[in-house]
Amino acid sequence: MAKRPSVYPFTAIVGQERMKLALILNAIDVRIGGVLVRGERGTGKSTAARSLAALLPDMDVYAESPFNDDPHRPDSWSDTIRERMARGDTLTITRRRIPFVDLPVSATEDRVVGTLDIEKAIQKGERHFDPGVLAAANRGILYVDEVNLLDDHVVDLLLDSAAMGVNVVEREGISFSHPARFILVGTMNPEEGDLRPQLLDRFALSVEVRGIHDPAERMLIVERHIGYEHNPEAFRAAWADVEEEMAERITRARALVDDVGYTRRDLFTIATLTSNLHIDGHRADMVILKAARAHAAFHDREDINQTDILTGLELAVPHRLKRGPLADAAMSMTEMEKKIDQINSQWGEGEDAEPSEAAGEEQQVKKKVNP
């Protein structure tokens, strides 16, 4: 196993529970679509993202692949691995750490998606691809600090790849594709400008972080960071058992999430909540369901419940509300709980008898007995 990088332990981060939960849910199910973290400087945004990457277990890859191709997922292989397999080449399976890729604000399109060598293709008939950031980030974490300062076109490329899980580069009739499934973590300080609403909606989850004001917690933050700076290895060793427990919990949840069931009543609840909140489009509904399933898996449950739906709502909706900044769009979870009770009372007896068709999901929705 590769040596774990010496970064601050994820479980040692004080407070910021919503941010940590949003990251964990994306680690459980990368299909959720990433998280946008908005807040002032010095609130642990980058520390949390780096710590999560160090926390996650190593992955199986083909040693010959620069794309972190998964040997167990032939359907996701890059063109390079497909071609080598077709030629009968022998490939070596090895273990790598989860990649953490930090994208600079000055990144260009070619730097992000990679480039095809057209001259070599024309002169020698060879298809040569120079991998970009998306290749390096596959199956890992792609971190973009000050994402609001990144060129909108580049942000679109990142969001498209995060949603589709593949990067396709086409030049002069020549194309190349490789897997690009990663946890997209964007951070920003709203005081330095905001993202366009169209781009905000493309981020699956969003959380707002603020400095902690409780004196005891602020003191704990200082104590832990001083301990880490004084002796990083000893500090990590002290947190090793808790880190391992969290890593195992995420691993179990990953194995369970596709089997987490939900009912038509759950879908009706989600749809009614987003409709009443006047959320445009249907992306929020799908994100809430995915987040709810990941949250249930994180708690070792095979069916989602009201708490899971509320958690998904709390993370998926605030940045999609039309009432301006997140601070003005804060939702009362107590009010949402009451609303769910009202929705449940509207749901007729026997409506849950048939399972729902989950578009885009391979798993069958489980039935469960109505309360």
Image (cartoon, rainbow, N blue to C red):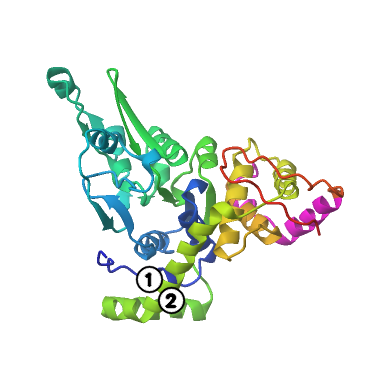
The part of the chain drawn in magenta is 321-345
Query: In the shown orientation, is residue 352 left or right of residue 172?
Result: right
Task: Name the quadrant of the C terminus.
Answer: bottom right
Q: Which residue is mark 1?
A: 9
Magenta segment includes 114: no
Q: Residue at x 73, y 46 (%)?
A: 264
Q: Cβ–Cβ below 8 Å for labels 1 and 2?
A: yes
Q: Residue furthest left?
A: 123
Q: Residues within 10 Å of mark 2 (few under 14, many from 20)?
A: some
Query: In the shown orientation, is residue 291 left or right of residue 122?
Result: right
Q: Residue at x 75, y 58 (%)?
A: 335
Question: Disc 1 versus disc 2: distance between alpha carbons?
Answer: 9 Å
Is residue 274 or residue 164 the one in the foreground? Answer: 164
| Above or below for 359 versus 303 | above
Q: Residue at x 78, y 54 (%)?
A: 339
User: Where is residue 102 drawn, in percent x and y?
Assistant: 31, 51
Query: In the shown orientation, is residue 274 left or right of residue 185?
Result: right
Magenta segment includes 322: yes
Q: Which residue is mark 2?
A: 242
Amino acid, disc 1: Pro
